[in-house]
Amino acid sequence: MVPGSVSPVWAGGLAAALLLLAELILPPAIAQTPSPTPPVKQAAPARDPNTIGIVAGSPEGGTLPLVNEIARVLAGGQEIGPKGELALRVLPMVGRGGVHDIQDVLALPGVDMTITQEHLLTHLQESKELGDLKSKLVYITKLFNEELHLIAQEHVRQISDLAGKPVNFGDYGGSAEGIARDLFRTLGVEVSEVHLGLNEAIEEMRQGRIAATAVLASKPAAVVEHLTRGSGFRLVQVPYPAGATLYLPAALHHEDYPGLIPAGERVETVAAGTVLIAYNWPEKSGRHQLLGNFVDAFFSRFPEFQAARRHPRWQEVNLAAVLPDWRRFKPAERWLQTSQARQAGTGSTGSVPRSDTPGRMVPGGRDPETERLFEEFLEWREQRGKR
């Protein structure tokens, strides 16, 4: 044996001993790396099997008041059981808005539904950030539009004045972030992104540290109504980008925000459609049945939501409007087919008409302003296609 050399047998034994020692002293997570398994959403404990949860975005967004109306309307008129229980209880939950609410629907046991933006669903499905959403989510109905409110300091006259300045896009992953970033990029206006809550952003604007903040909410939004030009704020026009397909042209009026918009004037902006989505529970599960009960109550009593005392955005909703390329919750589809057949008087359960036009009212009638803006958009797109 050559001096300084190691016997192959002894070396092999040493290597085996070191490997065994590593397995004994290293934590399991380091010694072995198991393949990740996707989490499976479990149903909520059956302490109150009649309660269905809907996450309603952040307090600064525009959907919380409408979700609260859903809970109040559906709670009224029900017979109360011997222990004070309701046949169906809708539980609104404050969320963070945007992608966070969709994550809650995918993961939290007590969250069955949320109201989200159509363009956000499209983006997440294309990017696969949260996996294949079309296998995990279904939609119940398209709802109303949410307008982008670009609130700026008084000296800001147009969106190009914000170039190079700090502009708040809201919380990371919130409802305003994606649409604001896309619009500024499309319009060629480079800004310095800031991510703050609305109240903090307003205070930063008062101190002159940021120039503007973006808010996506249905008009009139309570978080915007209290602002006035006299306190140094204004709403800035947001031009409709050429070639945009995920947004709609919209306008804010003096009647919406008398403290910010002078009488007789309007502020052009863009709007995003919203949709009520739900977790795709297995068809024979109790949660699927409960979601079906919700659909029956919500659709059957929808005329109550369009009463004058309710939020005006309910007037825009067409329950039969279709969200292309997404599956509707089967009980919702069946309810609409049955309702259509009953109205037609044929007794048939024919297919639901494919209508994606916003602003149509159910039953009959239209929101004239939304209809006019959309017709202008269609005419603009047609003329552009002839060039």
Image (tube, rainbow, N blue to C red):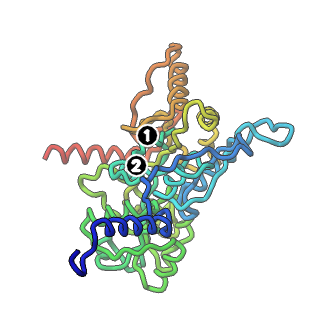
Residue pictured at 20% horizontal, 45% vertical: 383
Whole-percent x, y for residue 34 in the image: 44, 55
Q: CA distance from mark 2 to mark 1?
A: 9 Å
Element type where label 2 sits in the image: loop
Q: Are marks 2 and 1 in contact (CB under 8 Å)?
A: yes
Label 1: few (<14), some (14–19) or many (≥20) C-alpha neighbours in 10 Å? few
Question: Which of the numbered marks, if any, corresponds to residue 131?
Answer: 2
Give the residue pinned by disc 1: 135
Element type where label 1 sits in the image: helix
Q: Is residue 90 left or right of residue 122?
A: right
Amino acid type at image mark 2? Gly
Q: Is residue 226 left or right of residue 22?
A: right
Amino acid type at image mark 1? Ser
Position of residue 334 relative to residue 153, above or below, is above
Whole-percent x, y for residue 97 in the image: 51, 59
Question: Which of the numbered marks, if any, corresponds to residue 101?
Answer: none
Q: Is residue 329 left or right of residue 110?
A: left
- Quarter of the image where the N terminus is located: bottom left
Whole-percent x, y for residue 84 in the image: 83, 42
